[in-house]
Amino acid sequence: MSLEKVLLDLKKGKVAPCYLLYGEEEYLIQEALRDILDLLVPPSDRDFGLFFLDGGDADFDLLRDRLSAPSLLGGPKVVVVKNTEIFQSKENLGNLIQKIRENLGEHPDKAVRSFQSFLKLSGFAWEDLQGAGWQKITDEQWRTAVEEDSGDDRHKWLPRIVEICAGRGMMSGGEADLSDQFEKLLAEGLPEGNCLILTAEAVDRRKKIFKVIDKTGVILHFGEIRGEAATRATLKTEAQKLLHACGKSLTSAAWVALGKKTGFQLRPSLNELQKLVVFVGEKSVIGEEDVETVVGKTKEDRIFDLTNALGEKNASAALLALQALLDQGEPPLMILSMVSREIRLLLQASILAQSGKLPPVTPGMEFPSFQKNVYPSVLAMAQSIARKEDLLVGKHPFVIYNALRHCRRFSYPVLIGYLDDLLEMDRAMKSSTTDPQLLLERFLIKACA
């Protein structure tokens, strides 16, 4: 069912006992949830008619008690459980590991959430993984617990996520699977006017609880928006909705400036746009100067500053960017992973440049010229490559452009040597008392020499 059909039914008074909103596009899920709640519970009734629970540590007994009792005011009562994990199963383990890998650097909150789900489903105990405990897991134990993942690279991501969780004071992997209790609750039926809304990132559609909701309630899927054009189109639509509701508009230059700072990513862009709406006050038009004033350097900006300075062999800029990231509280292991990623991209760019399959990329080539004359050849090469999202050819065009420009400053053997250096640094950070900042500074000075 589409969101438009759901909202139309709600306007007609047709309310389902349960709604499931799931998918990768978290911002769209939150917007849909807001639209549904606006029709279900009037603002004046929300103190006694609307309750939110966190799916990661939701108290099921409390949830059941609230759903089983009618509203004190006689109107509708809605319980929202955000980011629930009841739809996941062992079949999701491979996907969870992939999400942990992807989010470790830029979205640690998501990585932690995925790791907690991983612990619940895999059977590994958080108490046994802390510190160096993860090293005691044998290959056989890993393959038994996680059939979809070989575990060959677990030494790269597992200690990093353990370090992040330990730093946040995580005490356990969470409660056991509650899906059976949710099934029973829905099978018994809810009092008239009561409604349960669940949001989730990933689901196993084969689970019984999913089929129960599909039969008795409403399911809305917000899948990942793929492709730069589709992402920008969705962002533009959502931005226009936000601006129209606030009586504002955005100049073309401001739109470009915002995109440069947020990468036209949906949630970061709209979060910054909301700040801009507040900043301009009664002014109806948001200009480029407003964007430059309000949207400061994010963590992603700092990471780009560091990797770009490395590519340009600008030691001074690289050291300043490193210090800024450390001052923001970024873990040295995360920074090391970003530097390692940049070296790997430069290595792949060097191979591409020497293959003779691409038009030459000169240091002075502008990005529009690259998109017109070089990027089509990269896309053609990418068509025949499996799992290209893990390789340079599957990255954003601007990332490919920078890597091909910068790789000319490094020889192939030197880049291979840097990978060995980074591996030794990774070992040193995890097993010695050497100052991680000193290790990173030494490497940047060496690579930029």
Image (spheres, rainbow, N blue to C red):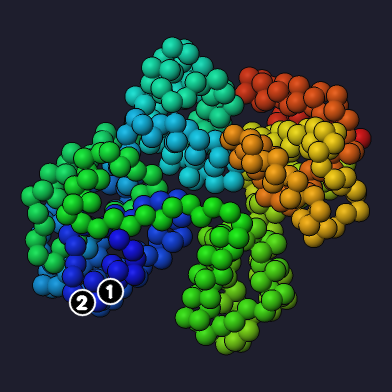
Residue under pointer 1: 8
As helix, strand or loop, the secondary structure at mark 1 comes to helix
Q: Quadrant of residue 415?
A: top right
Q: Are marks 2 and 1 in contact (CB under 8 Å)?
A: yes
**Amino acid type, callout 1:** Leu
Circle 2 — which element? loop
Instruction: Tell me the quarter of the image containing the C terminus.
Output: top right
Task: Tell which of 292 and 130 is nearer to you.
Answer: 292
**32 sits to left or right of 401:** left
Q: Residue at (38%, 17%) from the top-left corner? A: 144
Residue at 41 percent across and 22 percent down: it is: 147
* Depth check, front residue: 92 or 192: 92
Q: Is residue 275 above or below residue 162?
A: below
Q: Which residue is mark 2?
A: 12
Image side of residue 333 versus residue 73, left or right? right
Name the spot of residue 256 as percent of width and height, x first: 70, 69
How would you rate the neighbour count of disc 2 (Cα within 10 Å): few for under 14, some for 14-19, many for 20 or more?
Answer: few
Residue depicted at 75% across the width and 26% down the height = 419
Residue 324 x/y as whole percent: 72, 49
Residue type highlighted by circle 2: Lys
**Taking 25 as reference, is 159 left or right?**
right
Mark 1 Cα within 10 Å, few/some/many (few <14, many 20+)?
A: few
x%, y% of residue 435?
A: 71, 29
The N terminus sits in image quarter: bottom left
